[in-house]
């Protein structure tokens, strides 16, 4: 639940209360004001009683010239004038706002509970100008509530010893006098050794001076006594990131998120840092809880969409993405459809990917990414003719789209349209697509045709292999292309020689002669990688050439 915040109308009401306050009516100088609102408790009445007990004990133990405890009546009047029940504990943001309105530089936040032996109070002293600057006070336990409250009152007085030094440090850091800030903070910590408020300012000064090791040392000391200290945790995360210690950074970020799970802005910051560190997977549980606690929030859904995608949690991304565009239709951009279709595809839902891409193309017909994705999705669900037409449209829209050419070639291969595929590779080369990549594509086609030929003994397969292998070698010479070209040519020559004899065919005799010549030219280079195989084939060629020459003379008159 989001915290309620005081409205501006409360200010005037509060000022009227202050004017009538007996404390303010006193003459003479008074000390700082400290506010003690209702404490958190399972028993609302106990929370009210504990706060009043601490006020009473602190007033008894201090002089008004040193410290003014904001009276219960002032607090209640301020709350009631803005519609707040005085018996309920305030959310952190509201407590800070109230403290500012009642002009209290410090306030107490705490919980009270009954124990088998009496009462227990856990509390913190907080600086009103920045509620992240807090001092955890020693836990107070006693058989009587007043006695526990008395312990808290004494702890408040002890903790306040650091405040003048902390203020001097704060002012020095604000003015860029960082070494003065260090000195002031150290003085404050000498007066109260466990001074986390002053320690936080010391950390700020060290950070400004780029003293990373000192930042870590002081921040870790603060974290040890106050694991939820926002300042220390943020400084540690920043410093560990600067030092490249990602493991420590992520550990601290997780602790930072756990320190205030209702603070949306804090959780968003932590999630963003986890994503920057390349660990979006750690942010997913935080994001899931945040979305569940704030359903329908467009900003959170948008952030969650990106977090789930980066974490490769595609199911979560699909759910959040669909909810995001339901809440805010303006988020259904071309990029959204591209990413959503990709998420469906990555999660194994090829049909949904195809449908999503098609919907995106209908809404954004000129978007090149969607066009390509639509063609890819159609191919993956077996809609080959539709996929081929879509891929052709991608290339027509941008003749230099390399992905479009490779997709079209893949589809044409699936449809056994080898002549078209050959033309696609040539077209791609003419439009500036990387020759090396096209050479590899042609090499694969040649290799596949060679394997088909060795199985089928069909000369058409060997001839197709030679065609693609020559193209591969033309675009980028390689030992593999040379060897396969020579091996294919040999097998083609062998097959043509046998049939030329049986059919007394001049055409087959010449095919055999040309094939063996091609093999003789390419096998030596292929022998650099395949020496044994190349040597065997080169040795075999002379066994065929006399017969082939004879057939050419006899059949080609």
Image (cartoon, rainbow, N blue to C red):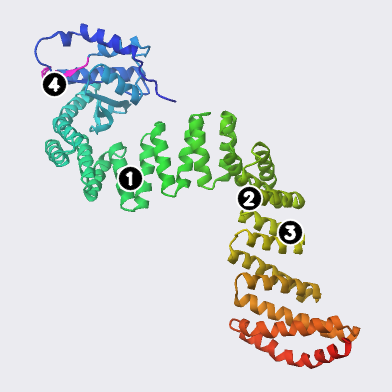
Percent of width and height locating residue 267:
41, 36
Q: Which residue is mark 2?
A: 398
Q: Which residue is mark 1?
A: 237
Query: At 9% across and 13% down in the image, what residue appears?
Result: 28
Q: Residues within 10 Å of mark 2 (few under 14, many from 20)?
A: few
Instruction: Single out the residue that lies furthest toward the front.
Output: 557
Q: Residues within 10 Å of mark 3 (few under 14, many from 20)?
A: many
**Front-lying residue, 432 or 290:** 432
Q: Quadrant of residue 96?
A: top left
Q: Secondary structure at mark 4?
A: helix
Q: Secondary structure at mark 3?
A: helix
Nearer to us of marks 3 and 1 is 3
**Disc assigned to residue 61:** 4
Nearer to us of marks 2 and 3 is 2
Gap in angstroms between the C-alphas marked 2 and 4: 82 Å
Q: Is residue 40 above or below residue 434?
A: above
Nearer to us of marks 4 and 3 is 3
């Amino acid at each position: 639940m989001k915290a309620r915040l005081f409205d501006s109308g409360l200010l005037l009401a509060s000022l009227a209360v202050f004017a009538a306050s007996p404390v303010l009516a006193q003459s003479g100088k008074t000390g700082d004001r400290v506010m003690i609102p209702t404490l958190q408790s399972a028993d609302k009445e106990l929370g009210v009683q504990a706060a009043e007990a601490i006020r009473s004990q602190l007033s008894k133990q201090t002089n008004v010239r040193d410290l003014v405890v904001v009276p219960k009546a002032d607090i209640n009047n301020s709350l009631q004038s803005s519609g707040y029940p005085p018996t309920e504990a305030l959310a952190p943001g509201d407590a800070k706002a109230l403290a500012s309105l009642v002009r209290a530089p410090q306030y107490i936040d705490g919980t009270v509970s009954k124990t088998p032996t009496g009462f227990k109070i856990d509390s913190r002293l907080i600086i009103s100008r920045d509620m992240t600057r807090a001092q955890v006070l020693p836990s107070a336990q006693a058989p009587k509530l007043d006695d526990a409250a008395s312990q808290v009152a004494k702890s408040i007085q002890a903790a306040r010893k650091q405040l003048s030094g902390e203020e001097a440090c704060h002012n020095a850091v604000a003015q860029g006098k960082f070494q003065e800030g260090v000195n002031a903070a150290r003085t404050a910590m000498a007066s109260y050794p466990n001074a986390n408020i002053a320690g936080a300012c010391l950390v700020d000064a060290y950070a400004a001076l780029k003293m990373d090791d000192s930042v870590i040392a002081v921040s870790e000391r603060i974290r040890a006594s106050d694991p939820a200290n926002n300042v220390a945790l943020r400084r540690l995360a920043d410093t560990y990131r600067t030092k490249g210690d990602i493991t420590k950074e992520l550990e601290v970020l997780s602790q930072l998120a756990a320190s205030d799970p209702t603070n949306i802005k804090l959780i968003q910051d932590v999630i963003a840092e986890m994503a920057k560190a390349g660990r979006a997977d750690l942010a997913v549980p935080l994001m899931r809880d945040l979305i569940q606690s704030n359903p329908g929030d467009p900003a959170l859904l948008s952030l969650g969409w990106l977090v789930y995608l980066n974490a490769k949690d595609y199911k979560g991304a699909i759910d959040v993405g669909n909810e995001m565009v339901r809440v805010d239709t303006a988020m259904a951009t071309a990029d959204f459809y591209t990413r959503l279709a990709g998420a469906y595809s990555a999660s194994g839902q090829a049909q949904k990917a195809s449908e999503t891409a098609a919907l995106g193309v209908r809404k954004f017909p000129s978007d090149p990414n969607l066009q390509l994705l639509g063609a890819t999705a159609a191919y993956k669900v077996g809609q080959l003719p539709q996929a081929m037409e879509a891929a052709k449209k991608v290339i027509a829209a941008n003749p230099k789209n390399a992905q479009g050419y490779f997709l079209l070639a893949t589809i044409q291969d699936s449809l056994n349209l080898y002549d078209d595929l050959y033309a696609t590779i040539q077209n791609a080369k003419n439009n500036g697509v990387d020759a090396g990549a096209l050479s590899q594509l042609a090499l694969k086609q040649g290799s596949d045709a060679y394997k088909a030929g060795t199985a089928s003994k069909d000369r058409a397969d060997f001839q197709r292999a030679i065609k693609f292998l020559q193209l591969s070698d033309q675009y980028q010479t390689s030992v593999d292309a040379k060897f396969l070209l020579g091996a294919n040519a040999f097998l083609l020559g062998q097959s043509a020689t046998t049939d030329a004899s049986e059919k007394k065919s001049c055409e087959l005799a010449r095919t055999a002669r040309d094939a063996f010549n091609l093999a003789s030219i390419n096998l030596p280079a292929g022998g650099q990688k395949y020496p044994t195989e190349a040597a065997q084939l080169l040795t075999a060629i002379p066994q065929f050439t006399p017969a082939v020459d004879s057939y050419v003379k006899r059949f080609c008159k």
